Amino acid sequence: MNISMIVGGMLSFTMGIILISLYPLHVAEVTIFTASIGMMCGGIVGYMFDSQSFLTGFSNGFMTGMMAPMLGALMTVQSIVFYLIEFFMVFCYALIVIVARRS
């Protein structure tokens, strides 16, 4: 369940912040795109485990995809935040690989 939350949430969070900084005048399109990508990825990874993980990944990807463009629109120091978010995303995915091998 936690793996599906991290995959859907981190992907939509990272995509939302990057896309809203690239296309600042297309807030609705970026929000819809990031929410749908987060829902799909979180749902697909959650579906590999069970139906409860599917729903958790689906809803977490949706909520993170809705909030990430709002956070990205408020950023002022974009380069530092980009590097920090990318590092955090790679770190989370590395932890998933380590933990998934043990379970």
Image (spheres, rainbow, N blue to C red):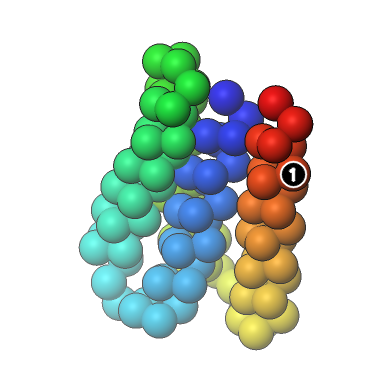
Q: Where residue 64 appears, x then y in whole percent? A: 49, 45
Q: Residue furthest front?
A: 101
Residue under pointer 1: 98
Q: Residue furthest left?
A: 29
Quick one: quadrant of the N terminus?
top right
The reply to whether residue 64 is visible in this rendering is yes
Q: Where residue 82 appears, x then y in whole percent? A: 63, 75
Judge by depth and name the residue closer to the eye, 74 or 34: 34
- Give the secondary structure at mark 1: helix
Quick one: quadrant of the C terminus?
top right
Residue drawn at the location 62% of the way across and 81% of the way down: 78
Residue drawn at the location 40% of the way across and 15% of the way down: 51
Residue drawn at the location 45% of the way across and 16% of the way down: 50
Q: Where residue 98 appears, x then y in whole percent? A: 74, 44
Q: Is residue 24 above or below residue 14?
A: below
Based on the displayed image, in which of its 4 quarters is residue 44 positioned?
Answer: top left
Give the number of marks. 1
Q: Is residue 43 above or below residue 53?
A: below
Q: Residues within 10 Å of mark 1 (few under 14, many from 20)?
A: few
Q: Which residue type carries mark 1? A: Ile
Residue drawn at the location 53% of the way across and 62% of the way down: 14
Judge by depth and name the residue closer to the eye, 9 or 95: 95
The reply to whether residue 92 is visible in this rendering is no
In the rendered structure, the answer to whether residue 80 lies left or right of residue 64 reads right
Judge by depth and name the residue closer to the eye, 48 or 25: 48
